[in-house]
Amino acid sequence: MAPCATFAASVAGRDPPALPRTAPRRRDVYIPTASCCTNMVDGAAPTRRRFLAAGAGAAAFSLAGCLGDDTTTPTATFALGTSGSFAGLNPLATASAHSWILLDLVYESGTVVDPVTFDVRPNVFTDWRITGADGSDADPAIDVAVRDGLTFTDGTPLTVADVLFTYRYLREQRPARYLPVVSTITAVERAPGDWDVRLRLSEPVGTYASSTLALPILPEHVWRDVDDYRRYRPSERGGPVGLGPGRVTTYDPDTSASLAFRDADEYALSSLDWRRDHDVLAAGGPFLDELRVQVYGSDAALQRAFLDDEVDAIYRTAATSAISEIESAAGKTLVEGSATGYGYYGFNLRREPLDDLLFRQALAFAFDDYHYVTEIHDGYVTQGDFVVPPGYTAVRPETDADAAVRTDPATEAYAYRGRDDGAALDVAAVRDFFVQGEPITGEPGTYAGQSYPGSLTGVRASQRGARYDYTFGPVRSDALADADTDVELRVDGRTIPDLLDGPLEFLITPASRSPERSAMTTDWIETLGRLGIPATRTVLSLTAMVEAVYAREAFDVYPLSVGGLSPFAVTSLYSLFHGDNADPAGDDTVRANNPMGYGLSTHASANDLIERALHETDTARRNALARRAVERIYLDAPVMVTEYPQIRWPLDTDAWTNYVADIPEPGSTNLATELAQLRPRR
């Protein structure tokens, strides 16, 4: 592999200039420079840009330089397209993923997570330790050693004072993005002996190395006069300023941005020992001069721009509808990567009978996974199961039993209950499941006609039996008037509309936004109708759905997706599934990450396992607890995971080489990793 590397969180970037639709290809853009013959004679140490000039086209370039005085060096500018606009460059205030395309390249953290092995690696911090986390009398504390010789993008040297300032400022300001991390820090001090900084904690933090030590390091000379972090305006303070490889040069939030990269001798973090010793990533990058990001008005326009060579890559992943055309295009590659999230349907556990495990499991039985994955998605997604992507094997339940990831029968507990002929739902089997009143709790058995081998980790569901008595009687609901059924479900003698003031309601975004999800929801509702469960769909814009789900909890069932989950699981589990992050009062002003209400009551909760994992600093024990929590959530079914996206990052490999495949989301989560590795072919 050619020499170039860095990890996603450790690369820097800046806003690219406007890129018109007719902009020339970046390999046709040249800037004047000294003759290559002169450079070779004077013995000057080669810079990154000189090295690039001596790359694939070295012979031709050297010859041209010796023949005349108008020698030019190609500028290695990478053009990235996106269909979403930026939302500010304040690293403490913006939650925009598009803004973090740039900010991930500007700011550096104390530690980084290796995108290949998921090991926590040194970065701004050379070493660290935690004390008092073993139940001793001492309060937990983290000591860190700060690396010497680093400079911010404005040339100012990094000092220990900058690190002390960063943690004190974040602890005082408590920005929402970092609140879960800084809320456990009780004091920030100079450390004794050979250590530089001590962070005192209110309680042990199991993932401290990848969370507490992974905050962006702020330059004190830029931020010390910012009384309120929300008032920071990078353009007014020469910023954004960070320790990363990139410096923002232009920025228009609705159209484009650009970022210039530092030379390797100005950015020491790309050549740390662990990077030099890495089996996949190469040290020494980034080998680009500039990143330009262009905003397009739609996904269709973005795809066209990529196929027409206006941009070198697309942010995130290719849409299912675009894959075949990109695959057939000359010089284009879909770089495969692993998912960092999943698509799902969430259930409102605050409402009867959705508060009953047996009812939620029966709904899952009626969802035709094969039809959704193979026919609707053309096989471009992977069937879902647990709330952890398949690539995060250390925290997947299969690891406990040395079982096959995704294919072990214990991962198929809620598989579609089709008839033997495969033609339709086995209605009789699912109705019998209702009447028998025995949900899947982790015990081996046969449920709705399908054998289940038992829990992989030995964990059990929170609820052991049905909360209601289920029967079937004559059809009464208008929503079933045209359904292929002659009976309707009763819950303690009442119909679903009696309980919910209407049929079971599925929220859905317009078909134009998510045609696959829209088609499957319609199919699912029709299948439930055959079962005798009246259901309907309500179409909302994404903004309206987010409001209904996360602010008002005004839903029965909703579909969404999550991404960027932690490979260590516990912080993601806490954020999405702990009762602390559910709104118990239904306050419309509160936007909680856990709208399902899972963990608010004892009949459905993994709070205990999540809390124990949060405080466990031993990696093996923490992962074991996380696996149990993941399987508890699976058995409790507050959500039904429908798919993991098959990540395919569109890249112009006719122009660029040295990309890294098979890492989590190379076009988004690990975009900075790719930008640090990429080199022009010519």
Image (tube, rainbow, N blue to C red):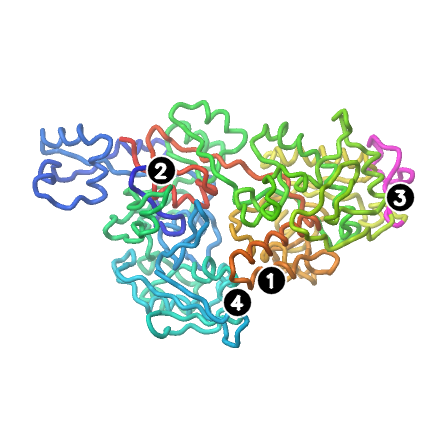
> Mark 4 and mark 3: span between their CA atoms?
49 Å
Mark 4 or mark 2: name the one nearer the start of the chain. 2
Q: Nearer the viewer, mark 1 or mark 3?
A: 1
Residue count near mark 2 (Cα–Cα under 10 Å), binned few <14, some 14–19, many ≥20: many
Amino acid on which disc 2 is placed: Ala
Q: Residue at x 52, y 72 (%)?
A: 202
145 w.r.t. 457: above or below: below
Amino acid on which disc 4 is placed: Pro
> Mark 3 and mark 2: span between their CA atoms?
61 Å
Mark 3 or mark 2: name the one nearer the start of the chain. 2
Q: Nearer the viewer, mark 4 or mark 2?
A: 4
Q: Is residue 238 visible?
A: yes
Image quadrant holding the C terminus, namely: top left
Helix, strand or loop for disc 1: helix
Mark 4 or mark 1: name the one nearer the start of the chain. 4
Q: From the image, tell me which residue sits under label 2.
A: 79
Of residues 375 and 22, which is closer to you in this image?
375
Mark 1 or mark 3: name the one nearer the start of the chain. 3
State the extent of the magenta-drawn residues as a range. 470-492
Residue count near mark 1 (Cα–Cα under 10 Å), binned few <14, some 14–19, many ≥20: some
226 w.r.t. 387: above or below: below
Q: From the image, tell me which residue sits under label 4.
A: 204
Q: Is residue 172 visible?
A: no
Q: From the image, tell me which residue sits under label 1.
A: 612
> Mark 2 and mark 1: span between their CA atoms?
45 Å
Q: Residue at x 56, y 31 (%)?
A: 380
Amino acid on which disc 3 is placed: Thr
